[in-house]
Image (cartoon, coloured by chain):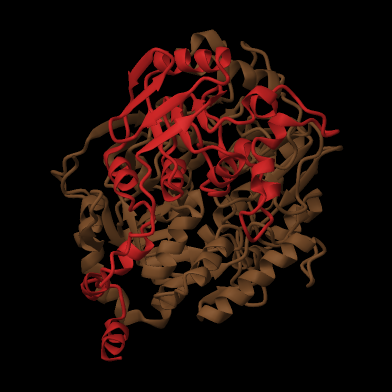
Amino acid sequence: MSDPTEDIPSVDYVEGSGIPIRGNDIDTDQIIPARFMKVVTFDGLGEFAFFDLRFDDEDNEKDHPFNEERFQDANVMVVNNNFGCGSSREHAPQALMRWGIDAIIGEGFAEIFAGNCLALGIPTVTADHETINALQQWVEDNPDGDIEVDVRAETVTYGDNEINVSVDRAQREALVEGNWDTTALMKANRNAIEETASQLPYLDQTRSELEADD
Amino acid sequence: MSQGTLYDKVWDQHKVTTLPNGQDQLFVGLHLIHEVTSPQAFGMLKERGLDVARPDLTHATVDHIVPTANQDRPYSDDAAETMMAELEENVRDAGIQFSDPTTGDQGIVHVIGPEQGITQPGKTIVCGDSHTSTHGAFGALAFGIGTSQIRDVLATQTIAMEKQKVRKIEVTGELDEGVEAKDIILEIIRRLGTEGGVGYVYEYAGETIENLDMEGRMSICNMSIEGGARAGYVNPDETTYEWLEETDYFQEHPEKFEELKPYWESIRSDDDAEYDDVVEIDASELDPVVTWGTTPGQGIGIDDPIPEPESLADDKVDTARRAQEHMRVEPGETMEGYDIDVAFLGSCTNARLPDLRRAARIVKGREVADDVRAFVVPGSQRVQEAARKEGLKDIFEEAGFEWRNAGCSMCLGMNEDQLEGDEACASSSNRNFVGRQGSKDGRTVLMNPRMVAAAAITGEVSDVRDLEEVAVA
């Protein structure tokens, strides 16, 4: 049998310029307001990232890093604590990814958001408040400056600095080994799935037995 | 790590294997889907040439975009119609049962699962919706997932997860009049923080939780995610079993009830279970809680002063300052007397029959204040019908409330029900995020359903204990 993960790229390293998004508790309604979710695909969501923070009622631009010319090529976002809290909408990381974000460095992430990022191959790496503040300031001062996120080594390098960051163990393994897209990987365990299901007292066992006879 | 908890037992029961990255692959006992987060997952499945593995363990409803006023097809909103049509096609092709509005079973996904008896103790339940934690009220292990994970579940009936820690939240003390489950969970989130539960599953325990009805337990588990915990649960007990016995599934399969009861008993957390953390809450000290800010953690008792941002933890100061500016409130004041324009009684947190009953006792014989738009959006068609039969619909309508059809409605403003401009809303929902109710200048004050009723009547945030309750049928 072929390796079910062979087509999934390893994401052990992300390099590029940064964009700072300051503030704790930035929820997924801020990242992508619900009215932009009235769609049946994720295509085109990038332009709506942080929409209500970027535009007023007359669609005039407000002060926001996503509007600033100097950050338009950024792909490493630097955020504070509890980023991505609230709704489970994958539309949030999908919008950020489609805007151009490939990695996020922050003080902390909401769990569902981090899981959604992993499912898209976007690392969410963490460091303490002071470290993040310093990095956000550096990005402000060096919008074209190069940031290297080394997922495998759990370091971030910028300017003359190398900082230690944390990457959740399972996330690191999945990204580095290139098995963050789990569908094929899990589907390959068909027999074990059937075995587990057959032990569940609440499942109608006649059905799985019928299936097994197919 | 925890040992001997319901979480450990249900996890082990559903564990298929450990994946190469260290995550466990878990079997999913029930997959609930709706129109907003599933279409892209079905799309990915098609792209990969995969079928839905277990349509028999998948159940669909429509709730987020469904209009609550005129539901004639096609819906007047083209985008809503497209999403509904897409869901209809997906469930038809896959052979998935769909509680659509023509069945009389439609409603918010976290209301209909329990109603139909498909939410059961000891199941793993997932849905592309963060409030899936609601189902934990039955002793299920239930959590919200993203669309790529929906794809995984559709294709394999399993999900990749890392095991979390367990925090036991022990709530004791008798609730004061006017204080409800909603107030308990708002207090928990205020105390532990909106991010305090990240990495944890919450086990709600203690005499106060045990004395709650199932609807109250659902309100609490529902908002676990607002405290950062992806899942929350209550150990199943006689209250759970009595509720389950009345549901469709166990009415149709009474033999299953007796058959499954030993399993339900077996998954309860052991008396000597080990927890990663324990927090104690004395609920007897609680007053009705209202939020003053733009996160569910920014709550206070109705008599308490709005805090000075500087008095809060360092990492909360900026958020509080911005929130007070948005809400236009001043530190030192109470929320009592805060003018409201809209009263919303609905959502997966508080739109079940007992919620509406309690609110009706406040509303009966009174009138909605001038200039206040007040409406009731029942959590499901069944709640709507039962409330109508009990006379609650008449009570609300006579008072000047609009009586709507079931859906998520103004909890997140994906249909026509939205705040306009800087309107302030007394809301029984779960999130007061900026823009959440459809207007980026809108202001949301979260509270329990009786408090929403009181605010609708007085036109301002009020202490429901000042309004005498009237008996309703």
Q: Nearer the viewer, residue B112 or B368?
A: B112
Image coordinates of residue B354 in percent, x first then y, are 55, 54
Q: Quadrant of the C terminus of chain B?
A: bottom right
Residue A196 appears left or right of B236: left
Q: How many marks?
A: 0
Residue at left 41%, top 38%? Answer: A123
- Residue B267 image-quadrant placement: bottom left
A87 or B446: nearer the eye?
A87
Q: Compared to B154, does B206 lie above or below? A: above
- Is residue A122 shown left or right of residue A200? right
Chain coloured brown: which letter? B
> Farthest residue toward the top?
B310
Where is the N terminus of chain B found, in terms of image quarters?
top left
Furthest toward the left, the residue is B272
Q: Mark yes or no: residue B180 visible.
A: no
In terms of image quadrants, where is residue B446? top right
Front position in the image: A158 or B9: A158
Residue that appears at 34% across and 45% down: A175
Task: Using the rendered view, name the quadrant where residue A165 is placed.
Answer: top left
Residue B421 % position (x, y): 81, 34
Q: Is residue B290 visible?
A: yes
Judge whether B375 appears above or below B32 on screen. Answer: above
- Residue B64, placed above or below residue B458: below
Q: Residue at x 26, y 91 (%)?
A: A213
Q: Colour of chain A?
A: red
Q: Position of residue B133 (x, y in %)?
A: 43, 50
User: Residue B322: horizontal and vertical position, in percent?
Assistant: 63, 19
